[in-house]
Image (cartoon, rainbow, N blue to C red):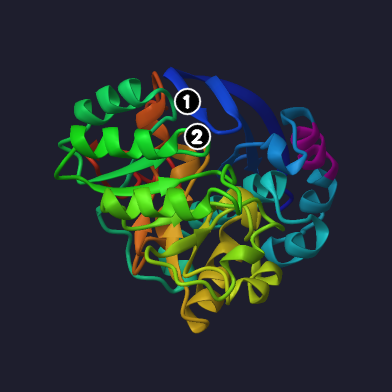
């Protein structure tokens, strides 16, 4: 049965401002792909990311250009060769998974041979800002068990120390978003160790992370911008202890599952991450949560509002998605 493909750009206000070392934003701009045979409809959401040369318009155009092939029967396997890893492929891949589940009456977990999705804890992000502003935000979230602290600018030792004082009981992980240098790496690592940080994401720019090779890492280091799909994995073995799997980088759940399997065989710990998007983007990623060291799927918690059928968060515990949402 031929599938009709449609896609649209959506804008979702963020509660306040989301800030990282590269800049700040007040809304999440997403692209939603929809596949339908006139009876059953599947959906997938992606977040175009300028860091990788994507715009909402370019992603929308890539989805629309692929629509005739999907109407002619292109499936998930063919999609991997048709489009590169990235946001456009993610939206279409997840829409195909959702459509397949709804058409078959099975869950995505059943189709993929995975255990059912279970409730799991997610990290909660504290945006970068002044030490005082970050301490205030950390104090407000102090009851959450895991806080992800955005760093990556001058003065990070003061920031992480202020956060630790404000949230003395929470586990802290750090995301530098490529903002450190070989020159300040040791100082920042020491400050994080003093604050009891348990994981650091992408301290150095991708392609400029040779300083991590073979060094004594007092805190496990997780690759984010340095890892996309399986092809990028082998070069990371001497530099990172974990990898952050995001569907917008892998180009969908299909490659994300394969990447997770390959990473475990190489003894990488797994972090499941996200861009800031709605629950429709988080639901597929929950299928990677089993066995993950860190789950960071707090995108909807950062929005001013979510989809009506969105994921249910009990504090920091995210519940499995409803079939009305996805999968």
Residue 272, image x and y in percent?
A: 44, 56
48 sits left or right of 124 in the view: right
Residue 270, image x and y in percent?
A: 44, 66
Residue 61, image x and y in percent?
A: 82, 35
Task: Inspect the magenta stretch and tell me whether residue 59 lies in it.
Answer: yes
Q: Which mark is residue 18?
A: 1
Query: Image quarter for residue 253?
Result: bottom right
Q: Which residues are magenta?
A: 58-65
Q: Which mark is residue 97?
A: none
Residue at x-position 37% and y-position 66% = 218
Q: Count the marks.
A: 2
The answer to whether mark 2 and mark 1 are in CB contact below 8 A is yes
Element under disc 1: strand
Q: Which mark is residue 276?
A: 2
Q: Is residue 158 above or below residue 200?
A: above
Q: Quadrant of the N terminus?
A: bottom right
Residue at x-position 66% and y-position 54% = 251
How packed mark 2 is, by other alpha carbons closer than 10 Å (few <14, some 14-19, many 20 or more), is: many
35 sits left or right of 266 in the view: right
Q: Nearer the viewer, residue 62 or 221?
A: 221
Q: Nearer the viewer, residue 230 or 200?
A: 200
Residue 313, image x and y in percent?
A: 26, 38
Residue at x-position 77% and y-position 52% = 70
* Lower sequence index among marks 2 and 1: 1
Q: Nearer the viewer, mark 2 or mark 1?
A: 1
Q: Is residue 299 above or below residue 100?
A: above
How packed mark 1 is, by other alpha carbons closer than 10 Å (few <14, some 14-19, many 20 or more), is: many
Query: Image quarter for residue 232?
Result: bottom right
């Amino acid at each position: 049965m031929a599938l009709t493909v449609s896609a649209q750009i959506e804008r979702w206000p963020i509660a306040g401002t989301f800030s990282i070392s590269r800049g700040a934003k007040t809304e999440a701009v997403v692209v939603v792909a929809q596949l339908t045979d006139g009876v059953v409809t599947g959906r997938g959401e992606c977040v175009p990311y300028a860091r990788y040369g994507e715009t909402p318009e370019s992603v929308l155009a890539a989805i629309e250009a692929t629509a005739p092939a999907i109407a002619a029967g292109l499936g998930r396997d063919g999609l991997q060769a048709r489009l590169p890893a990235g946001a456009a492929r993610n939206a279409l891949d997840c829409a195909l998974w959702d459509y397949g589940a709804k058409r078959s009456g099975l869950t995505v977990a059943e189709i993929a041979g995975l255990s059912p999705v279970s409730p799991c804890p997610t990290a909660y992000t504290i945006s970068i800002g002044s030490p005082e502003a970050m301490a205030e935000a950390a104090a407000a979230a102090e009851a959450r068990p895991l806080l992800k602290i955005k760093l990556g600018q001058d003065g990070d030792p003061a920031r992480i120390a202020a956060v630790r004082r404000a949230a003395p009981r929470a586990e802290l992980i750090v995301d530098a978003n490529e903002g450190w240098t070989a020159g300040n790496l040791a100082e920042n690592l020491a400050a994080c160790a003093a604050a009891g940080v348990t994981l650091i994401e992408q301290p150095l720019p991708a392609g400029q992370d040779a300083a991590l090779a073979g060094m004594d890492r007092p805190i496990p280091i997780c690759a984010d911008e340095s890892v996309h799909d399986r092809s990028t994995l082998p070069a990371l073995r001497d530099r990172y202890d974990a990898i952050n799997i995001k569907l917008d980088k892998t180009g969908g759940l299909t490659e994300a599952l394969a990447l997770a399997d390959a990473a475990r065989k190489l003894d990488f710990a797994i972090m499941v991450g996200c861009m800031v998007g709605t629950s429709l983007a988080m639901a597929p990623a929950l299928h990677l949560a089993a066995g993950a060291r860190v789950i960071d799927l707090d995108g909807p918690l950062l929005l001013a509002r979510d989809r009506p059928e969105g994921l249910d968060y009990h504090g920091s515990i995210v519940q499995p998605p409803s079939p009305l949402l996805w999968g």
